Structure formats: C-alpha cells, structure tokens
Image (cartoon, rainbow, N blue to C red):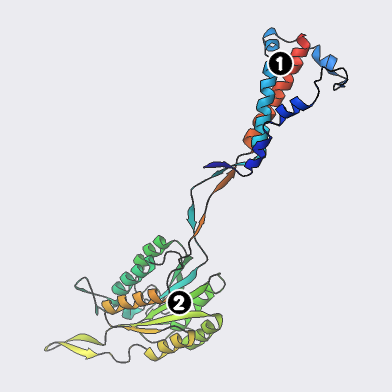
Amino acid sequence: MTHFVWPVMLLLLPLPLIMRLILPRVGDKSVEALKVPFFDNVSALPVSRRLSALSGPKVRRVLGMLVWALLVCAAARPQWTGEPSKIPSEGRNLMVVLDISGSMREPDFELNGRRVTRWDAVRTVADSFVKKREGDRVGVILFGERAYVYVPLTFDLKTVSSLLNEADVGMAGTQTAIGDALGLALKTMIDVPAQSKVVVLLSDGAANAGKMRPLEAAAIAEKAGVKVYTIGAGSDSMLVQGLFGAVKMSRDGEIDEKTLKEIAEKTGGEYFRAKDTQQLQRIYDRIDALEPVKNDDVFVRPVRELFYYPLAAAFALSVAGAFLMLAGRGAA
C-alpha cells in the first residue's frame, strides 16, 4: 500500500497559481527581470526548428506545473508499506536435555501398540513437545558419558525437529553425565536475552560420569534464575528370559530420583516420573502448561521510501525545461 506520510504538504499544489494572481507580471516595466550575463552566448547556439517548436510558452508552462507537482509530492514523503509480518519476540529460552546413554536402548516402552526402546518413545514425545513451542528459542543437548550441544537455541523449530529425529543412542558414550549436561545447558543459554529460561532434563539413570556434580550445576542454575524440570524415564520392572520363560524383575534404584528431585526443587521446577509412553506424554503436556508460550506476537510492516522517484523526475523535467527555454530564446 502506498501513502503519503505528510499529506498536508499537498496543500501547496495551488501555490504557483495563487502567486501568479498576487505578484505583478514580469512584463511590467516596474519589475526588474533576472539578469544572466552569459545568456546571449547560450541563446546564440544553433537549434533545430523542431526543438524550437517545443519551447513555446504553453509547453514551458505545462513543464513548470509538472515539476512543481512532483516537488510537492516528494515533499509529502510517499511511502510503500507492505503486509504485516510476524517476527520472533524475545520470549523464552527452552533447552531440552536428553539422555542417550546405553540404557536408553531398553525396550520397556510402547508406542502405537508395539514395544519400543526408551529412546524411541522419548524422541517421539520430545519432538511433539518441541513443535508446540512456536515463539520460543528451543535448543537440544544430548548426553551420555559426554554432553554436547546438538541443536543451539533457535526459533527454527522445523530444524530442531528434523535433527532430533536423526539422533540415536550411544552418540555420546554409554554412561550418564547429568551434571555436565546441565552445566552445558546453562553455559549455552545464560547470556542469551530472554524473559525466562527453562531446562527440561530427562534421564533414565544415575550420574556416573562427567566432571561437574549435578547439584553443583543446580546451584548455578538457581543463581542464574534458570528453572529446571527433571524427568526420570523407565519402567519399574523388566522382563528377563529364564529357563522357565520370561520373568519380571524389579528395577528399583536404577534412576537417581533423589538427585533429580533436588535439582528441580532447588531451581523452582518440578520432578516427574515417566514409567510408560502415556505418562511421558502427560508430563510434557504438563510442562507445556506450566511454561506457556508467550502470546504477545510482534508484527512489523516493511516500509520503503519513494520520495526520490518524484524528486528525480522533477529534476529531469527541470533540466529539460531549461534546455527548451534556452532553445526558444536562441530561435527567437
């Protein structure tokens, strides 16, 4: 859409006509005309008859009116404004920290009626959670024996989803470095501006690797104002094949729930226990409700200045008019 920023300037359009009525004509002997010392030399230059015909008073008058109209239009500052487009607002930094240690290969979850590994279930549910976070910067950290930034904080949720589906167990070793993973999440997001900063950390075991202890990382998160939600994933039992068939055995103590709870409590988050895929889905839905996406959408309209078009046209017509006037004088 094109419009004038200062449309009041258009009131100047009839000014030349008003001045023509008020001021005395140049032909009046009482009015001194403009003296140009080199005008006789210029007017003596040879000019074709056709060019001389175009230098009549009517043509010059029309050119003068066009030049004035273009100058007034330029002064009114025409602009082109495009359609509003949504831009990312400074909302929330959300880092998803996922355990990909060797134990995540355990097939104790179900997905769509078939038994799958913990990682398959976690990856599917986490992907669904990420896709809902439109408006937040989302990143992914994967950890096992080592922790690394798999996806840096970004608004591009499609890329996050795509890369998340390509990750697999064992990419970072077989042990569990919870403290290093949380510490790396804090280091990645702590200097990035945001209204709030949230970490969702999922693990199926106990910290048995890494340099930083989990509670040390939790203390840093508390000081930095980063809220940490922790999830313990894994069923309470497992099937073991024996001489007389499959036997169900307890898994008590496999997940360090005490540490995960302390991390959440220290940082103002919550701890959740996911024993199956349905519980895991409900947990991510719960976190989504506890940390809603910012709804204050920010829209901008692209704006382009257009005043230089009428200004350039006025200049070109002025040059043409001056040339025609000199041509007319020379022909005379």
Q: In which quarter of the image is residue 150?
A: bottom left
Q: For the residue marked with disc 1, what is the amino acid?
A: Pro
Q: What element carries label 2?
A: strand
In the image, 13 versus 291, the foreground residue is: 13
Of the two numbered discs 2 and 1 in the rendering, the one whose residue sits closer to the viewer: 1
The residue beneath circle 2 is 199
Within 10 Å of disc 1 (Cα), the crowding (few <14, some 14-19, many 20+) is few
Residue at (88%, 20%) from the top-left corner?
Answer: 30
Residue at (48%, 80%) from the top-left corner?
Answer: 227
Q: What element carries label 1?
A: helix
What is the quadrant of the C terminus in the image? Answer: top right
Answer left or right for 197 relative to 231: right
Indicate whether 297 appears above or below 304.
Answer: below
**Mark closest to the chain's N terminus, 2 or 1:** 1
Residue 310 in the image: state x and y as whole percent: 63, 33
Indicate whether 250 appears above or below 291.
Answer: below
The residue beneath circle 1 is 57
